[in-house]
Structure formats: structure tokens, C-alpha cells
């Protein structure tokens, strides 16, 4: 089949990948990684086309015209809680024939796939794990004459219809996984960018999948944690180096959580002398000086950490399981080893008050990471936080388009108003980024004219966002 991998158009720079959708807050946009992984898997048996309408800044009209010109025989699209109404409206407008299978992936589809498939007859299936080859199995069993799947048994990691019945294929529960090298030749690589990257070109990459932790605000703890076969991983990295890419964004949700696996990967990276610069995500409670030192030797220059709050009670309420003192210790070690840090904070979590929020803002300045992200607590679909928010009456159950990067309040937790949370988020961004000491340090970190302009663009976009004031009408209309 001719399969189209589609990142739909939108009126904002929606980032929808790895079951975490939000709006870009600065001048950046990274690969829709779910589709990148599927590009290699589906290319084994199918002719694959790739269309990222967001990064190409396409209107709905131009994206629809491009899709018509491609004449796909199957469509695999990415959606998310931040944009799913727009995404489905766009796909509905394409008037896709019923004999063309349309399959989607993303947080919203995993959370409410059966409901969406019931409402939209053109939606043929939902991929529940983007590292699996389930769509390939489905397409190979698709009968284009009847518009039905002809297969005995179920398809693992896929929700689909068969004879008007819903079937949810069971995850086989394998500890290790692998997938073919993605089709980098299909991607407009020079159009993607990340705010904390050192180089213009970068590759997104995984050494594991899922997360063994269960923070209440996060969706990704819903999957069993599994490890990528390292021979398969290194094969991809050799290819990436051959095509001239020297920077990686290792998108493991908690790099280092399986110490043995991560350490073996780092030693192989060093031994093969591939000389990548790279960025990753982790938690302070899995890091120590020994592991950080090895990561630095292997080329790691930036680590993202979820810090969330300075208040131990709030951290306990969201099952984060970290302590502010431990955060300080790990950030100090990172500075010692010249590894840059990005700290993620969330304002407006259960238990937040004016005092705890202000204390978190001061704590963030004391922590002094190289990059920082202040977000508004969002009751995202499929999370325990959403279930609690509905139960407590903090959010209406029908409000299902949410964005933790938004400038609108996401929920009302009684101890502090949603509007005040947004005001404090804006205050935090301005106070942190406009400190003379921070501006001097950022200037000293710039290594090229490209980095200078990117920092200027990101800074301008971020500070501009803090000047936005939601109207009463927007809040009352439920645009949360």
C-alpha cells in the first residue's frame, strides 16, 4: 500500500508526540516521533509518504491538496489532547473512502479510542504503542474490496473493529523490543529545532520505552517499561552518523532508570567513538555522580528533570517521590560536570496556594538551571490527576482539550484560582529569565550566530507569551 504518515495542520505549533501533547512555547518544533518510528516499520512492506503539515506551516487547504495529490491507500495520523478536535475536523473534511484504512495514535486516542471510533466511522484503528509493528500487521490483513480486516486472532497493541465488534489487542509484554531504522530521508530535517540543542540537525532516539513511575499528572506511566535491544539501537546510531547528524535527543522518559542497560549503552557509545552530542530526560533520584560522569564522557550536554514544585506536600500528592534537597544536589553535580540542566515546574497542582507557588518561584531561582519551563497544571485525559479533578469538581468532565503550556487556567482547585495560577506562571517566567545573572550566563553559553538568533527568538516568544491576559469570555467558554 501507499501509506501516508500525517501530522495534521493546526492553528498553533502543536507538539503531539510520545503521548504528551502541548503547544510549543518558543521558537522550536521537534520531530513527531511516533510517526518517525513508524516510517521505518511500515517501509518494510509498504510505500511510505510523510507529511508534517505543522512544521511546513501548511493551511488546511494546502494540506488537503497535498494529501489528494499523494493519493494514499492508507493513512496513519498523529493527534493529541491539545488539538484533537481540530485534527478530527480536518480528517473528516477529507471525505476519505471507507476502503482506505485510517489509523491514529496519540494520547487522546489511547485514552478515548473506542468513543472516537464509535463517533467517527472512518477511523479504522488506534495504535497503542508506536514502537510496535501492529499497523503493518493490520494493513497486510486489510481487504480493500470490503474495507474490513481479514485476520484470525487479534493484533497486539491495536484497537480496531472486526465484524462491527471492537477488539483491543493485548500487549505481548516483551521486555525487549527493536524496530527498523526510521526513514530519515523522508523528514525535512532542517526545519526541526529544539531550544536546548547544540547543533542545527538532530535525531530523535530511544533506548527504552514507557516509564516505571506513576506521577499522577503524567500519562506515560500507563505503559510497562521495556528496553530497546542495544544492537538494534547502535545500528541506527551508526546510520545517523553516516548521514551527517551529530546530535541526539534521547527521548527516554527516565534515562538511567535501568542502570545496567543504560550503562552498557553509554560504554558502547564511548567505545564506538561516534562522538554524538546529546540531550535526554531523567529523574534526580536515579542520578548520581558516577552515572552523570559516564553520561558526560559519552557526550551528554543537557538533561531535563521534572522538578514540579518546591513543596514536599504537593510532591507527595502527585506521587512524584522526590525531595527538593535531592534536586539541589543533582543540579550541583551537573554544574560540576558541565552538564546543562532544564527544570520543569508545574504551578496549580493539588494543594497549591499563593504561598507555595511563590516559594516554588524563589526555589527555581535558587536552583538556577540553564533552561526552565513553567507550566500550568493540566488534567490531561487518561491521568490520575484528571480523575481526581473530575471527582473533586475542579474541572468539568466534558472539558477534554487541555494543554499544560496554555495561557488559560486549566482547572479550579479551590485553594488558588486558575486565573491567579496563570498570573504566577507569567511572573515566574519574567522574573527567572530577566535576571541580569541569568542573561549574562546565557550570553556566555552562546557558541555561534545561529545559537544567538535562536536564543533571541525563543526569549522573545516566551516573554511575549506572559503578556497575554485571558478574558472572562475565554474562561467561561471552557477554553481550558
Image (cartoon, helix red, strand yellow):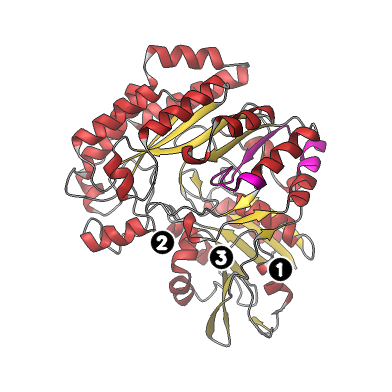
**Whole-Å distance between the Cαs marked 1 and 3?**
13 Å
Query: Is residue 422 visible to the viewer in this orientation of the structure?
Result: yes
- Viewport quadrant of the N terminus: bottom right
- Left or right: 405 as drawn, with respect to 446: left
**Whole-Å distance between the Cαs marked 3 and 2?**
13 Å
Query: Is residue 348 visible to the viewer in this orientation of the structure?
Result: no
**Residue where numbered disc 2 is placed:** 382
The residue mark sitting in front, 1 or 3, is: 3
In the rendered view, tell whether residue 31 sits above or below residue 382. Answer: above
Q: Are marks 1 and 2 in contact (CB under 8 Å)?
A: no
Residue 416: x percent and y percent? 18, 43
Viewer-proximal residue, 118 or 364? 364
**Residue where numbered disc 3 is placed:** 128
Question: Farthest residue in the left direction?
Answer: 414
Question: Which numbered disc, 3 or 2, marks the residue that appears first in the sequence?
Answer: 3
Question: Farthest residue in the bottom direction?
Answer: 163
Q: Is residue 264 one of those drawn in magenta? A: no
Q: Which residues are magenta?
A: 237-261
**Residue where numbered disc 1 is placed:** 136
Residue 346: x percent and y percent? 35, 40
In the rendered view, tell whether residue 291 sits above or below residue 14. Answer: above
Residue 28: x percent and y percent? 54, 35
- Left or right: 352 as drawn, with respect to 126: left
The residue positioned 62% from the left and 16% from the top of the image is: 447
Which class describes the residues within 10 Å of circle 3: few (<14), some (14-19), or many (20+)?
A: many
Q: Quadrant of residue 427?
A: top left
The residue positioned 66% from the left and 68% from the top of the image is: 135
Amino acid at each position: 500500500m501507499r501509506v501516508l504518515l500525517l501530522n495534521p495542520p493546526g492553528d498553533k505549533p502543536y507538539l503531539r508526540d510520545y503521548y504528551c501533547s502541548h503547544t510549543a512555547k518558543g521558537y522550536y518544533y521537534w520531530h513527531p516521533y511516533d510517526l518517525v518510528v513508524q516510517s521505518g516499520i511500515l517501509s518494510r512492506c509498504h510505500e511510505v509518504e510523510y507529511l508534517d503539515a505543522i512544521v511546513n506551516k501548511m493551511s488546511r487547504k494546502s494540506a488537503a491538496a497535498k494529501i489528494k495529490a499523494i493519493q494514499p491507500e492508507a493513512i496513519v495520523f498523529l493527534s493529541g489532547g491539545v488539538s484533537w478536535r481540530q485534527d478530527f475536523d480536518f480528517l473528516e473534511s477529507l471525505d476519505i473512502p471507507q476502503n482506505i484504512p485510517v489509523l491514529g495514535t496519540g494520547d487522546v486516542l489511547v485514552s478515548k479510542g473506542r468513543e472516537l471510533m464509535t463517533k467517527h466511522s472512518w477511523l479504522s484503528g488506534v495504535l497503542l504503542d508506536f514502537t510496535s509493528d501492529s499497523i503493518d500487521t493490520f494493513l497486510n490483513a486489510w481487504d480493500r474490496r470490503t474495507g474490513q480486516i481479514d485476520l484470525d486472532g487479534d493484533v497486539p497493541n491495536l484497537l480496531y473493529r472486526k465484524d462491527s465488534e471492537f477488539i483491543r489487542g493485548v500487549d505481548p509484554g516483551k521486555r525487549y523490543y527493536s524496530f527498523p531504522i526510521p526513514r530519515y530521508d523522508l523528514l525535512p530535517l532542517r526545519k526541526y529545532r529544539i531550544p536546548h540543542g547544540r547543533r542545527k540537525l538532530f535525531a530523535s532516539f530511544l533506548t527504552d520505552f514507557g516509564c516505571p513511575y506513576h506521577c499522577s499528572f503524567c500519562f506515560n506511566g500507563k505503559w510497562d517499561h521495556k528496553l530497546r535491544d542495544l544492537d538494534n539501537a547502535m545500528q541506527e546510531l551508526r546510520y545517523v552518523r553516516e548521514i551527517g547528524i551529530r546530535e541526539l535527543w534521547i527521548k527516554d522518559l527516565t534515562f538511567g532508570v535501568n542502570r545496567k542497560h543504560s550503562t552498557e549503552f553509554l560504554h558502547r557509545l564511548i567505545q564506538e567513538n561516534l562522538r554524538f552530542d546529546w540531550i535526554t530526560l531523567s529523574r534526580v533520584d536515579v542520578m548520581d555522580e558516577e552515572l552523570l560522569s559516564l553520561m558526560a564522557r559519552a557526550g551528554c550536554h543537557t538533561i531535563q528533570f521534572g522538578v514540579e514544585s518546591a513543596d514536599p506536600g504537593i510532591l507527595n500528592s502527585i506521587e512524584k517521590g522526590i525531595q527538593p534537597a535531592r534536586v539541589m544536589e543533582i543540579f550541583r553535580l551537573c554544574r560540576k560536570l558541565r552538564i546543562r540542566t532544564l527544570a520543569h515546574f508545574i504551578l496549580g497542582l493539588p494543594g497549591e496556594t499563593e504561598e507555595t507557588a511563590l516559594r516554588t518561584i524563589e526555589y527555581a531561582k535558587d536552583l538556577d538551571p540553564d533552561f526552565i519551563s513553567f507550566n500550568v497544571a493540566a488534567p490531561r485525559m487518561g491521568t490520575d490527576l484528571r480523575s481526581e479533578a473530575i471527582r473533586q469538581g475542579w474541572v468539568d468532565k466534558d472539558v477534554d482539550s487541555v494543554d499544560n503550556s496554555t495561557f488559560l487556567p486549566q482547572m479550579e482547585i479551590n485553594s488558588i484560582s486558575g486565573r491567579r495560577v496563570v498570573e504566577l506562571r507569567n511572573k515566574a517566567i519574567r522574573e527567572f529569565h530577566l535576571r541580569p545573572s541569568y542573561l549574562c550566563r546565557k550570553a556566555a553559553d552562546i557558541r555561534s550566530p545561529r545559537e544567538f538568533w535562536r536564543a533571541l527568538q525563543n526569549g522573545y516568544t516566551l516573554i511575549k507569551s506572559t503578556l497575554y491576559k485571558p478574558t472572562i469570555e475565554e474562561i467561561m467558554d471552557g477554553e481550558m
